[in-house]
Image: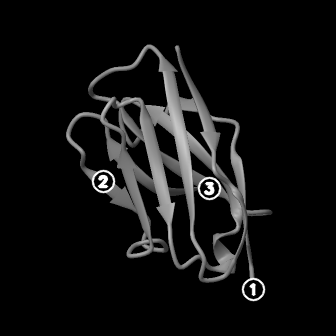
């Protein structure tokens, strides 16, 4: 069983930056993937960025490439999302997730609200 705790959300002006953090505890595997999804009001959940637990391979949604950076801590139980050049359309609840692969994200945090004002 894996538990995820998110932090770092808040209100920021367009063009500003935020860093989200996620700490994982419980049973994990070296092959696990961790990352971030988001859901804006009235919209479907979107995959934002993920990183492979062991190999460090990353994935970014086209909408955030060049602006967001995902990274993991040395202990392999934390993941961060550095968000730069934020836009109002980035406003959403951001969820930390973990699982065996990108296609199977089994564990989810409670979410952290990011609001970007124009």
The numbered mark at residue 38 is 3
Give the farthest residue toward the left: 55
* Marked residue nearer the N-terminal end (1 or 3): 3
Asked whether 44 or 116 is in front, the reply is 116
| Quadrant occupied by the C terminus | bottom right
| C-alpha separation, residue under disc 2 versus residue under disc 3 | 17 Å
Please report the residue visible at 53 percent of the width from the left and 79 percent of the height from the top: 85
The answer to whether residue 21 is visible is: yes
Q: Is residue 102 left or right of residue 54?
A: right
- Front in this rendered view, residue 94 or 82: 82
Front position in the image: 14 or 111: 14
Instruction: State the CA–CA distance, disc 1 to disc 2.
Output: 29 Å
- Residue 76: x, y in percent? 34, 31
Question: Is 118 above or below relative to 55?
Answer: below
- The label on residue 58 is 2
Q: How is the image coloured?
A: one colour
Q: Nearer the N terminus, badge 1 or badge 2?
A: 2
């Amino acid at each position: 069983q894996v538990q995820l705790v998110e932090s770092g959300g808040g209100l920021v002006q367009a063009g500003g930056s935020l860093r989200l953090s996620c700490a994982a505890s419980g049973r994990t595997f070296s092959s696990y993937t961790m990352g971030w999804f988001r859901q804006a009001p009235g919209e479907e959940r979107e995959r934002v960025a993920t990183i492979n637990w062991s190999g460090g391979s990353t994935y970014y949604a086209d909408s955030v490439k060049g602006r967001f950076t995902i990274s993991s801590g040395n202990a392999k139980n934390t993941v961060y999302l550095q968000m730069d050049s934020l836009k109002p359309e980035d406003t959403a609840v951001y969820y930390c997730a973990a699982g065996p692969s990108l296609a199977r994200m089994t564990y989810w945090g409670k979410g952290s609200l990011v609001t970007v004002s124009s």
